[in-house]
Image (cartoon, coloured by chain):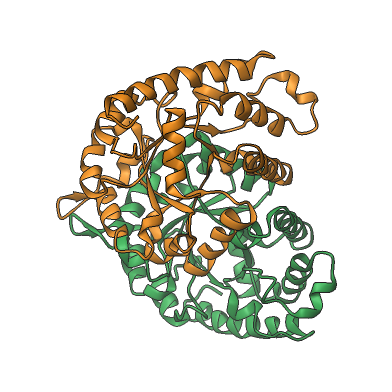
Chain colours: A orange, B green
Amino acid sequence: MKIENLINQIKQKKSFLCVGLDVDLDKIPKHLHKHEDPIFEFSKAIIDSTSPFAIAYKPNLAFFESYGLKGWNSLEKIINYINSNHPEIFTIADAKRGDIGNTSSKYARTFFETLNFDSITVNPYMGRDSIEPFLEYDNKYTILLSLTSNSGSSDFQFQLNNGKPLYLSIIKKSLSWKNKENLMYVIGATKAESLKEVREIIPNSFLLVPGIGAQGGSLSDVCRFGLNENCGLIVNSSRQIIYSDNSIDYAKKSAEISSLIQREMSEQLLKKGII
Amino acid sequence: MKIENLINQIKQKKSFLCVGLDVDLDKIPKHLHKHEDPIFEFSKAIIDSTSPFAIAYKPNLAFFESYGLKGWNSLEKIINYINSNHPEIFTIADAKRGDIGNTSSKYARTFFETLNFDSITVNPYMGRDSIEPFLEYDNKYTILLSLTSNSGSSDFQFQLNNGKPLYLSIIKKSLSWKNKENLMYVIGATKAESLKEVREIIPNSFLLVPGIGAQGGSLSDVCRFGLNENCGLIVNSSRQIIYSDNSIDYAKKSAEISSLIQREMSEQLLKKGII
């Protein structure tokens, strides 16, 4: 997907909401278990009902892999369903991959070619040659973990080097990588004030922001420090949206929650003069 | 697997060789393509021929995932084949996973339960709560990326904090995690001298050492700084062993190369008084 198409979609839907597909068979409504592929049925209904309010979907690979072959099969069906029926949607493989160069090339092929996702989350720990194979793909985006939303983010991501925390050093260093224009960054909503310093280094990049909802981050704080003139934010919510209701009407409830978040996002976009 | 069983196997086979299964359809002998599952046929023959000389196998997830469902199916067959036919072998899922706690729990389930590997490589960047879900499993091992063998390892892993490089801070910090006795560590062979400082912090832990062979690391340097009284090393070689020959006799050639490495390892174990 061209970045212009993502920005256009944001303006049209007045939303920068990403719905995280952390699909857990123990948490989906019980009536779905009679279907041959409950994971796909659940996801399809959530996608159809929430897509007027969401601009991106983010399947979380761990949840699919935990069901082995069956889970991988459901994932293929979901990405194909989105690409065929909702081609405007930006798709994110939340896979957090990264390895030595020849191995990262394989991961890039998996997610950008075999599965045809628009983007993938990757881990920076192994440095330049673990990320550049992903960046070679035109119109595909590599979303670098920088500052994550979990409690363990304080273990290493804030370690100081020359007075600068590791996550900022990583962002700075990434600007020297080949095809850096294909980079986006993960910045957790639970540390919204950090977005100010991040924006000083990468004013124009898109940021994927997890941590709204179940993890406790605030949307208005994220917007205050993170919005740029093209929006520049993709804000994710997973559990709050997809597990809001356990009845036969679950998808309707997910749409209602998404619509509430979209309305709040619309106000923020208006205030910033983006729409 | 109990750690005693791994140590016994090392003493019996006089080897601490791990064979990396980076199976690439473009690189395996052409005659295998007539089989229904060339990836499995290739791996099975390599495993059968090299297992007298190797104590561990390390399928590299990226290579399997890049073939989608088919690749995932081959991986399941390979791990089941090893567990059924070579139960003494230590298995390593080279997956480099890691995510927020509830997601890491899913990855742990995938590799320790669904696939029944003995161990998995994980990425430390997201800190304690991204790793502890893996450590909960008894007799399963979580191999923490510390110092990797690729060129990009110099980008962040050597960043100094209070005079100590990041990879050493990570190792030190990991000793405060719950069930830390289930940790092993990745230390690349291309920086063998670093093993000295690593051994000061974790004298008794097992280290998975990639980078011998195609990546240029030296076995004798690794042994000099890394061997402990229980061996404490698992040294991996992938391409040098599995792609040593392209003829119908490829598995025989792989066994020959493995046997040469095993002989060198046997000398090192003898010198150190381990066997």
Measured as percent of width and height from the top left, residue B131 is found at 46, 44
Which residue appears at 57% of the width and 80% of the height? B266
Picture layout, residue B27 above or below residue A50: below
Which residue appears at 29% of the width and 35% of the height? A227
- Looking at the rendered structure, the number of numbered marks drawn on it comes to 0
Q: Is residue A146 left or right of residue A116?
A: left
A100 or B93, nearer to the observer? A100
- Residue A79 makes an appearance in the image: yes
Q: Is residue A186 left or right of residue B5?
A: left
Q: Quadrant of residue B254?
A: bottom right
- Residue A16 makes an appearance in the image: no
Picture layout, residue B138 above or below residue B96: above
Measured as percent of width and height from the top left, residue B147 is found at 38, 63
Which residue appears at 27% of the width and 24% of the height? A271
Q: Is residue B44 left or right of residue A251?
A: right
Which residue appears at 68% of the width and 49% of the height? B116
Measured as percent of width and height from the top left, residue B113 is found at 66, 43
Picture layout, residue B208 above or below residue A190: below
Q: Quadrant of residue A192?
A: top left
Measured as percent of width and height from the top left, residue B92 is found at 60, 58
Of the 4 image quadrants, the one containing the C terminus of chain B is bottom right
B164 or B4, nearer to the observer? B164
Q: Is residue B60 left or right of residue A232?
A: right
